[in-house]
Amino acid sequence: MAKTRLVIVGNGMAPGRMLEHLFEAAPEAFDVTIFNAEPRVNYDRIMLSPVLSGEKTYDSIVIHGDDWYARHGVTLHKGQRVTGIDRVARTVTSDAGVSAAYDTLVIATGSDPFIIPVPGRDLPGVRAYRDLDDVEAMLAAADRGGRAVVIGGGLLGLEAAAGLRARGMDVTVLHLTPTLMDRQLDPAAGYLLEKALTARGIEIRCGADTKAILGDTRVTGVELKDGTVIDASLVVMAVGIRPNTLLARAAGLEVNRGIVVDDGMVTSDPAILSLGECAEVGGRVYGLVAPLYDMARVAADRLTGGDAAFRHSEVPTKLKVTGCDLYSVGDFADGPDREEIVLRDAARGAYRRVVLKDNRIIGAVLYGDTADGAWFNDLLKKGVDVSGMRETLIFGQAFQGGGQMDPVAAVAALPDDTEICGCNGVCKGRVVAAITEKGLTSLDDVRAHTKASASCGSCTGLVENLMSATLGDAFNANAVKSMCGCTPLGHGEVRRLIKAKGLKSIPAVMQELEWSTSGGCAKCRPALNYYLVADWPGEYEDDGQSRFINERVHANIQKDGTYSVVPRMWGGLTSAQELRAIADVVEKFDIPTVKVTGGQRIDMLGVKKEDLPAVWADLGQAGFVSGHAYAKGLRTVKTCVGSQWCRFGTQDSTGLGVKLERFLWGSWTPAKVKLAVSGCPRNCAEATCKDVGIVCVDSGYEIHYAGAAGLDIKGTEVLGLVKTEEEAIEVTAALIQMYREQGYYLERIYKWARRVGYQVVREQILEDAGKRREYYDRFVLSQTFAQSDPWSERVSGKDKHEFKPLAALQPELV
């Protein structure tokens, strides 16, 4: 059966979600071609503000990477704008001259930013705030410093202002009306918001009408109609958007404010659908993600023969500025037929206002404490008669029923169709079903399987409460939140903020992230030291005093206070010369025990601490370097004899093991890392219980990872098959780098992989060649600063006081 030729103009969040539904319902039914004016893949546009502020990166907001399109057979034309639609021939043509025929066309051209028509609007330095190019331009401006003027005190404008302020710019916000976000907030909440932003160092000027943007060759300032002039090196226009309807209008489709569609997202041409910000349905156009995702669901259903229909519903508004909690939904304008209930708590900076009509909620504004937003919205959507709870309504769900309910019990009491995540339209019932049916136990798992809290993240607390209600003691949110007693932040949050804020020393981390202790503790200092080493190669200087004793002295302390020393033997190979040198050292220093380890190395046990430098010196003269047997880093690459000696060996496993160990040694990782390479499926090197294992087969190299054979016993997961040694090395290095960048300190690979998801690892390391190469390149860069032998450094005198015995003091006799 021939596939339906589906052509999509635009590659934003709405068509991306539509394709997800489509591939789930009918994976083989469509031959999909996408034209995207932007030169990139589909990303989460509502996360641009966190990218601007430095809380996220572009990579972290990509929704569908190149591998996703390849896996679904989608032809994606990046950086190509469609210039014409021939509705008779049913073809579209791009500005690059590429034509594509369609059976069904979907127009998802989004919207364009509105630029106020004032003199100077075209000057360099004047930007809209619409896509990643705008963000990158603002980041470049922020690097140069100076003052930014943001015109528009709505959602986007305030998020831009907060992001630029976080990047170090002086920022002034100009807003035409008397209070901020006047379309979403009432004046009282607007006042509180202005107060909070001012406290953050952002200048707010309400009632400010822009007359002109000043400058000759680039922007130098903004002049207001009252004569005020504000210096500026950057001006950001964030005053609204307009549906992009040019293409549809030129094609003769019915267009009003947007491209007119029916409730099935079908335009005036039955062969053409439209969705997203460019579409007008029921006389409305939308700019928030929740209704756009609903359009995507309806469009996908219609394309697969269903009869789903789009229905308008009120969409809550939230501001993505850390620390400014606000929530508004519905209609909260004054009116003679309306009542309002207001709660003000000046001490806490909290404000609540619920607007009623005929004993039903029609609007709500919350500032400061927004935990009840979803509950108010649920009452609004369902038209619940609230007369019976009117006396306690404003206090929220926890105070209904005559007593105060804890947050977990409150979310447990919500009906299954209560919307938990507004960004992604996820209801309580879906989250609970995913938790119970798939055995999910972590927030990341729930995000991965349901998308709840995966976008702006403002519903994270609600999702965690729902997990607590569903899992009980099996869900311990605190266990993953707190890094140690010095901070309430979890490892993930600390890692993210180190990068976002550019923190490059332990004191800087503790100061900026508000550590509660002056110098940290034995839990957080080693972790911070690792994160800084991993994140800032070449910039951060390793702090040896923040390492545990074994890493500090580069040997393993034993129960009697002596140490053991393990020289590196590449891939498990040794020679007569090396064995002779080891024997000489053992005799010279009277080392009592010599043992072969499970990782095919020789361990010399019982070395006195003061003898360590001399032992290392002798071993160094024989060509040895440290085996890092004490390290949170690469330890050994175990091998079998492979095709050189074994009758069953299919590849040179020993040679590959040597190459891997020489390439990877010295790299610091969240926890110890052990590798193995087996020459055939008989697996004599036991590769299938290692952190990373390679099993050589006739067709190439099977990459395994996430095994364990210590406190936990776990077989590996299969990452995939590659054909050459070079590919095997690249995949291994990229995998380790991904682990280095995402793992929590002391978190083994198997725990990290389970946390982030095996499929995610597979997608980024095996299926996305570009991303794999990026990880690989970052690993190579890091290694240029890592591969120095700590033993030789100590022999040369570094921290030599560490190995001097304490002086023997004798009491003076009188």
Image: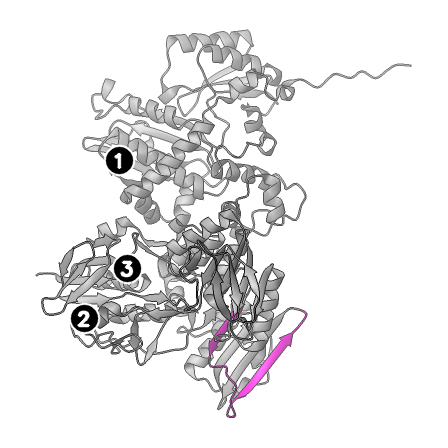
Q: Which residue is mark 3?
A: 11
Q: Quadrant of the C terminus?
A: top right
Using the image as rendered, state which of residue 110 and residue 170 is in the foreground: 170
First along the sequence among labels 3 and 1: 3
What kind of residue is marked 3? Asn
- Crowding around mark 1 (Cα neighbors within 10 Å: few <14, some 14 to 19, many 20+) is many
- Mark pair 2, 3: CA separation: 20 Å
211 magenta-colored: no
Q: Are marks 1 and 2 in contact (CB under 8 Å)?
A: no
Nearer to me, 14 or 482: 14
Q: Quadrant of residue 453?
A: bottom left
Q: Nearer the viewer, residue 226 or 629?
A: 226
In whole angstroms, how far apart are the C-alphas of marks 1 and 2? 52 Å
Q: Secondary structure at mark 2?
A: loop
Q: Nearer the viewer, mark 2 or mark 3?
A: 2
Picture layout, residue 519 above or below residue 55: above
x and y percent of residue 773 in the render? 32, 38
Choose the circle earlier in sequence order: 2 or 3.
3
> What is the x, y in percent for residue 333?
50, 83
**In the foreground, 652 or 766:** 766
Horizontal placement of 246 versus 444: left or right? left
Residue at 14% from the left image edge and 59% from the top image edge: 100
The amino acid pointed to by label 1 is Glu
Disc 2 crowd, CA 10 A, few/some/many (<14, 14-19, 20+): few
Q: Which residue is mark 2?
A: 251
User: Residue at label 1?
Assistant: 702
Q: Around disc 3, counting alpha carbons within 10 Å, would you say few (fewer than 14), some (14 to 19), or many (20 or more)?
A: many
**Three-letter code, disc 2:** Ala
Specify the segment rendered in magenta.
326-347
Q: Is residue 597 left or right of residue 354?
A: left
